[in-house]
Image (tube, rainbow, N blue to C red):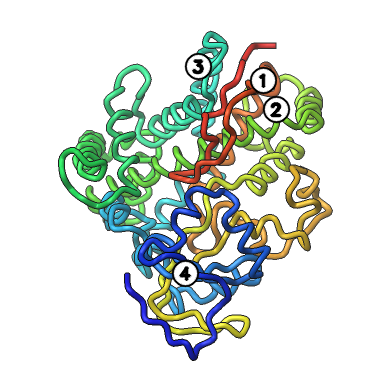
Amino acid sequence: MTTIIDKNINLPPGKLGLPFIGESLEWLLDPNFFQKRHAKYGNIFKTNLFLNPTVVLIGHEGNKFLFENEGIFFSDGMSLAVPTSTKKLMGSGALVMQMGKRHKENRRIIYQALQSKSLDRYIPIIESQTVNYLKKWTAQKTFKWHDELKNYSLSIATECFLSIDIVNSDIEFSKLYTTWGKGLLSVPVALPFTNFGKALKCRELLLEKIGSIISSRTIENPGNDLLGNLLLFCKERDITLSSREIQEQLLTLLFAGHDTLSSALTSFCQLISKNSKSKEKLYEEQKWIGDIDTLSIAKIKEMTYLDQVIKEVLRFAPPTNGPPRKVLKDCNYKGYVIPKDWNILYSIGQTQRDETVYRCPYEFNPDNFDQQTKKPAMSFLPFGSGSRECVGKEFAILELKILAIHLIRKYEWKVKPKQSFKKILLPAVHPRDGLIVEFWKK
């Protein structure tokens, strides 16, 4: 994208980098890219990422400005600002690609299947998968935990959403999904040997598989999974969704319940291994809770320190930065012009390291979320905010907590030395060497 800049307007500080590529390489190679520029330029600066001149906002005030002006100064969601490969592989039926009234209506439908009152039905599945994977890890003894957690989270998502068992009966689904996911941020050249070309083919095969599951459901037997919940909700309210739209919605939910969640799970395992005080307090809380015959949402809510720890993991190591929006028309913020047709981006990571909000923001400290501490709106937003907040937020937190409960009660692990912990940013944040650990039962 070639942009002619009017030198008479007061652009935010920063630099656009090299022609065409801008600062894209620096962003990909340096996990502290936003931190360094924030320190140098403040809460608003310009850069150029992936052929798009971009304004970055940091802090709860900037987030408020952005979210309050969606549909006015900024696009409603990310669909106008993401790469072509992402648009095509997600599809127009996916919730994250929809805007306006269509997004609002479909979000309401999806949300009801993933809010707190619907989550108890998924607990037995999550627990069963968790127990099976813990047995596997105990037998393996040493492994790359991030790779395993990707399999773990995908196994849970496919069973909870579609009643698909990718471990024992449908391994092909997992392979197709993995190839599809690799294409989301690829160069959009649709040749059979490219990542994008392979991903397009796998997308159609995945949608075909999901479509056959939808066709097998009946009004009398819609199923007890998320798909069944959606079908029942639509029937009771006389809502019509095309099969294709349901297919694309479910494929997108699998992505949200896999890549970003496995990142958060990995961060929990890594951070707790380094923070013995927090680990001990988690164990003491579980001892205080005592034996649990049947885990439930109500019982999990009693675990207040676990809630603090999970929130601090998501603050300290959010899986992603905020997705970009397109600037619809020139606007002003803090005395700077944000030009039309640029991208605008909010940094979740830097916002959640605001020293005016968090104590020692560059240290892991669950006390940041004790009940006495009130945070400004939009200062903690690992799942986004407003009408674009992740619809699977409660499901993701539930899965994080259930794994944490089982780990803390019965297992130990040690992170192996002499490995790279450098953060890889895409498709979601994870350590370069995959977090190699030794694992055993207490």
Q: Between label 1 and label 3, give the one nearer the viewer.
A: 1
Q: Residue at x 19, y 40 (%)?
A: 201
Q: Between label 4 and label 1, give the one nearer the viewer.
A: 4
- Which of disc 1 and disc 4 is earlier in sequence? 4
Q: Between label 2 and label 4, give the one nearer the viewer.
A: 4
Residue furthest to the right in view is: 372
- Which of disc 3 and disc 1 is earlier in sequence? 3
- Whether the residues at callouts 2 and 3 have beta carbons within 8 Å, the answer is no
Of 152 and 358, the residue lying toward us: 358
Find residue 132 and name its label. 3
Helix, strand or loop status at disc 2: helix
User: In the image, what residue type sits under mark 3?
Assistant: Asn
Of 183 and 32, the residue lying toward us: 32
- Whether the residues at callouts 1 and 2 have beta carbons within 8 Å, the answer is yes
Helix, strand or loop status at disc 1: strand
In this figure, which residue is indicated by the disc labeled 2?
273
Find residue 414 and name its label. 1
Q: CA distance from mark 1 to mark 3?
A: 20 Å
Helix, strand or loop status at disc 3: helix
Q: Is 397 situated left or right of 256 in this image?
A: right
